[in-house]
Amino acid sequence: MNTTAKMALGVNIDHIAVLREARRINDPDPLDALSICKRAGADQITIHLREDRRHINDFDAQKIMFNSALPVNLECSIDPEIISIICALRPHRATLVPEKREEVTTEGGLDVISHLEKIKKAVAQLKAHDISVSLFIDPDEAIIEASSKLDIDMVELHTGRYANIYAMLNTPLSTTHHSLVEFERPRSELTKMLADSLEQIKDVAYFAHQKGLLVAAGHGLNYQNVEAIRDINVIKELNIGQSIIARSVFTGLEKAIRDMKELLK
Ligand code: PXP
């Protein structure tokens, strides 16, 4: 295994805007994170311009695009109105994600098979504006197969299920958390589920790599569960938000990012 390959870290700074929107004021400003992310060794800024603008808004996105010294990965839905905004912003990359208004966070991957025509259209529009395109998808070979036929550059594998099973096994308090109830099982079963879920991410990552796609991963990754994902050699980028911003409340953002970078070595 090539252990020297560099794993890139994209920091999802949306969570800073989540805190700001809790008060609907202008503090903290995600813009202030840009120079800290750069100094701490992050490789990319990741933001999600949601249709409901519940955290990052259009003005944030414009300011971040204008001021970021790091490449910006803009996550967005396939809604034509949003795609036109992304084309005007011209980020380094657009990551297409599914969106449901009622969800707390992106719950599953993009259903490339059911929404093929809409996705094709969005991809064509983004590529015409020289924007690299990634699809945020579940680790599923059939979805990779369908994705590989599109004019995309990358897939980002959804690690949320792996992270939830990991949390259920390792964080006793989380057993009461509503989002984890579906994983309430005996430990032996959870241990097997965790191994299977990791194996699935690994197999699908290699499959995507063989299909010529760059492979990223993200969602629910933290300082405890990231190492097994880091060790999947063909995954070249992780996008991590919640755990880094949560830790930053106690350690400061720069240290929180440096700690994560250290784990990714
Ligand atoms: N990648 C994508 C496509 C996402 O939608 C998110 C959630 O904002 C992340 C990565 C980061 O997830 P988390 O905040 O759980 O680290």
Image (tube, rainbow, N blue to C red):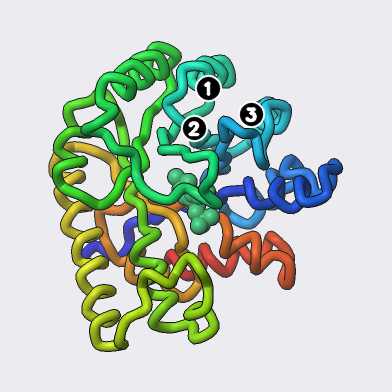
Please state, as top left, top right, bottom left or bottom right, where the C terminus lies in the image.
bottom left
Of mark 3 and mark 1, the one earlier in the sequence is 3
Density class for disc 2 (Cα within 10 Å; few <14, some 14-19, many ≥20) is many
- Tell me the residue at 74%/40% (across/down): 31
Q: Whole-percent x and y of residue 230?
A: 35, 64
Residue 25's mark?
none
The residue beneath circle 3 is 65
Rounded to the nearest angstrom, the CA distance separating label 3 from label 1 is: 16 Å
Rounded to the nearest angstrom, the CA distance separating label 2 from label 3 is: 15 Å
Image: 209 above or below 170: above
The residue beneath circle 2 is 76
Image: 61 above or below 248: above
Location of residue 135 (image quadrant)? top left
Image: 31 above or below 261: above
- Tell me the residue at 29%/41% (across/down): 214
Looking at the rendered structure, the kind of residue marked 3 is Met
* Residue 10 visible in the snapshot: no
Of mark 2 and mark 3, the one earlier in the sequence is 3
Image: 65 above or below 128: below
Name the element at disc 2: strand
Q: Whole-percent x and y of residue 140?
A: 20, 49
Rounded to the nearest angstrom, the CA distance separating label 1 from label 2 is: 7 Å
Density class for disc 3 (Cα within 10 Å; few <14, some 14-19, many ≥20) is many
Left or right: where 238 falls relative to 244 = left
The residue beneath circle 1 is 82
The residue closer to the viewer here, 30 or 187, is 187
Whether residues under marks 2 and 3 lie with C-beta atoms below 8 angstroms apart, the answer is no
Whether residues under marks 1 and 2 lie with C-beta atoms below 8 angstroms apart, the answer is yes
